[in-house]
Amino acid sequence: MIVRMRFSLILLTISSALAQDAGATRADWAHYGGTQFSWRYSALDQINATNVKALTPAWMFQTGDYAENLQATPIVADGVMYLITARARVFALDAASGREIWRYQYPELPRNIPGFIGSRGLAVSDGKVFFGTKDDYMIALDQKTGRQLWKVNVDDARQCGCNITAAPLVVKDKVIVGGTGGDGAHRGYITAFYTKNGRLAWRWYVIPGPGEKGNETWKGDSWKFGGGAPWLTGSYDPALNLLYWGTGNAAADFYDAERVPTGADKSKDVNLYTASVVALDADTGKLRWHHQEVPDDLWDYDSAYEVLLMDREIRGRMRQVLVHMNKSGLTSVLDRVTGEFLGAFSVPEVRTWIAGVTEDGKLVGRNEPQLGKTTTICPSAAGAKSWNSMAYSPRTGLLYVPVNELCNDITPNNRAPEEGRNYMNGEFPVKLAAGRTTYSHVDAWDPVTGKRAWSVAYKYVLLASMLATAGDLVFTGNPEGEFFALDAKSGNRLWSYQTGAGHRGSAVSYAVNGRQFIATPTGWHSSVVGAAAAALFPDQDWRLGSTLVVFALPEASR
Amino acid sequence: MKRLMAVLVVAGSCCAQNLADVVKQGEQIFAKSCATGYCHGVRGASSGAPRLAGRGFDQAYIATVVSRGVPDTGMAAFAGRLSRPALVAVVAYVATLNGITNPAIGAGEVASAVLPGPALTGDAARGAELFKEAVRGFGRCSTCHEVDGFGISVAAPIARVPASAAALKALATPSVKTGSMDGESMPVLVLSEGKQGAVFYDLTSAPPVERNTPPGSVKFADSSAWRHSSVIGAYNDSELAAILTYLRAVITP
């Protein structure tokens, strides 16, 4: 009986592995999102629900860069880990021992480069290591030596007020990257360079210029400074040769009189292609289709987040879908071939910005901030989920999401835009949603049914990415410094380790010589959302830091 | 030079009460931005960046460096980042650190001596916008030239401004050479060449790419077919004329 059960389990595992081959990582963690399907899911199962309690630190690496702490997703290829810090110090480490192989240090920047210092990751491909910088350069290093091979400027940070904090995405012979600046008077774009020599391949502006389709969704010249910055990393489907990217909010964030054409119908697209998911031809950067999630985004709910690609049966038919959440926690499921809207669900328990969503994806009952008034809006502009990623396990069919129950009191203003300067046009202090005592929860959601399978409350906020594994475990960390594992099926906490500093980064799993490792960046985020969150809990001392902590099962127990 | 002279001319022409206020304001701005981090330290005593106190700097020099920055160092151009009165105040404060007890604080005079931007009018003002206009993407002048704190300093600072759009298009650019590598030839600006290899800007397409190549892998030959005309197609002649007017207004030969 036991033998038969095991046999059927293996069969099940094999068939699902074949169907879902492209989304799972194995020995390597090759891309920002694990694979370019962005599941943050490892097929490794050496560490599992039964033995995870024995998980113990194998090695640690102190980066020495405490500028803005360690947020990056490490990349692992052939037993070597590549790690980038906030100030673009790049390390190649032996992924089994932590021994340093090479290091690279980007020059210290002038203090007048506006924006935020920070790096969410790098990309490794074509024998090179690619990353962006605060002063808007794309850099390629030699993967073996760390020697700089090329460097190209994407924009003048002093003028655009924009930076590159996202990990690039390498597709075939191109390295593709977005930038920040969507809360400033700036016009966002995605730029592709040839990996070989750094020459420009294409650039796609989020906001169409005069004469281009979509420009008519902007009032007057507002398209020039209308935001939309795609400030995170997209996904790629090689079979369709399509890039999927989330775009940022329209600017000004909380005030729309200067950017929305008079009489615009907000049940249709407004301010294209901000707050949207777009599908671009990977070779040319040409727009294939779009789905705008928040027409006339007046809440700073930009849709810049990760895009998960998966194949799921929906209403009796196998579909190639993408799953995408924006800051409001509204999560859309689209046909990734055509962009057809298939469904949506909302993850925060407190929601006041809309009453709901129609079956064809239209927002109903918009609760818009008004000039001259203060309006309480939930969830907050800090996000029902922040930029840290969710994870998806094909074994459970569930998405794992850290959800924050924050609101903000938005008071808009009508200040005029100044190129490259802040153009949020509002005050928006963040607070706990009314009637609640806990600030967050880790949830498991079924993207097909839109139902929550389980939820585990947490007293403070959660701002680290999720990692799911075939051991049916879900890993993440909290600001108090605990890195912990939950049972993917029930949410029960199975293991926890106090790493000594808060978590704002993205854990990964990989294997070297058959030994599975779980690696997590540590160090609390000291600005933007991290600072706003910390301000809510003045009695808490969430520690900064910049250490990568790597766990494995003890050698003897494997 | 004429513009810098104006600073010296107005020195000492302002009222004492106001001067104390302005210097005080400059001290506060200095403490908040210049003295912080790894920069100039408390009262300019240095904390990584050069010491600024007791260096014998004159006010014109201070004003130029503060507003235009020092290329390839951490010293950025503050002309676009601090307001004009704030710049005047900081310059006056740093002057006092250098034994100048009565620095010029006539905002108009100091500003017009060292600051671009608001002081420009007509074609020069329009040219300043065109020079770095974001909608032109990589087709704008600032893709390769840094002027008054904006743009990327790929080319050496502009020393002489061509007389006309036609002259700009025909301008000889002897520093642009031809690089040959892997059977491909490309227009290049060489930054260094030695035992460690070569570092050069590849000007094949905009934006230029700074490339590092191993020793012996690239060969450079003098002269190139590259001309400005191949990269300024996004501008018409009237726009180019306005840009040249702007450059003449801000660049001191």
Image (cartoon, coloured by chain):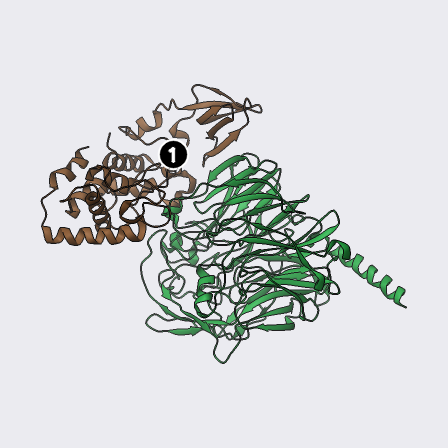
Task: Indicate the position of residue A148 as horizontal and vertical percent values.
Answer: 52, 35
A400 is higher (above) or lower (below) than B142: below
Q: Which chain carries label 1?
A: B
**Residue B127 appears in the figure:** no
Q: Locate the N terminus of chain A by quadrant.
A: bottom right
**B202 sits left or right of B251 in the view:** right
Query: Along the line of sight, which residue is nearer the eye, A20 or A164?
Result: A164
B72 is higher (above) or lower (below) than B33: above
Q: Which residue is drawn at 57% across and 35% down?
A: A196
**A547 sits left or right of A533 in the view:** right
**Quarter of the image where one finds residue A18:** bottom right
Task: Indicate the position of residue A273 as horizontal and vertical percent values.
Answer: 48, 56
Task: Indicate the position of residue B164 as horizontal and vertical percent values.
Answer: 28, 29
Could you classify mark 1 by the number of other residues whose Cα lies within 10 Å: few (under 14), some (14-19), or many (20 or more)? some
**Quarter of the image where one finds residue B56:** top left
**Residue B139 appears in the figure:** yes
Q: Mark 1 points at which residue?
A: B232
The colour applied to the residues of chain A in this rendering is green
Query: Along the line of sight, which residue is nearer the eye, B214 or A391?
Result: B214
Residue sitting at the far top: B222
Task: Indicate the position of residue A525 as horizontal and vertical percent values.
Answer: 49, 59
Q: Locate the C terminus of chain A by quadrant.
A: bottom right
A364 is higher (above) or lower (below) than A388: below
Give the amino acid at mark 1. Answer: Ile
Query: Along the line of sight, which residue is nearer the eye, A119 or B207?
Result: A119
**Chain given the colour brown:** B
SS type, badge 1:
loop
Q: Residue at x 35, y 73 (%)?
A: A373
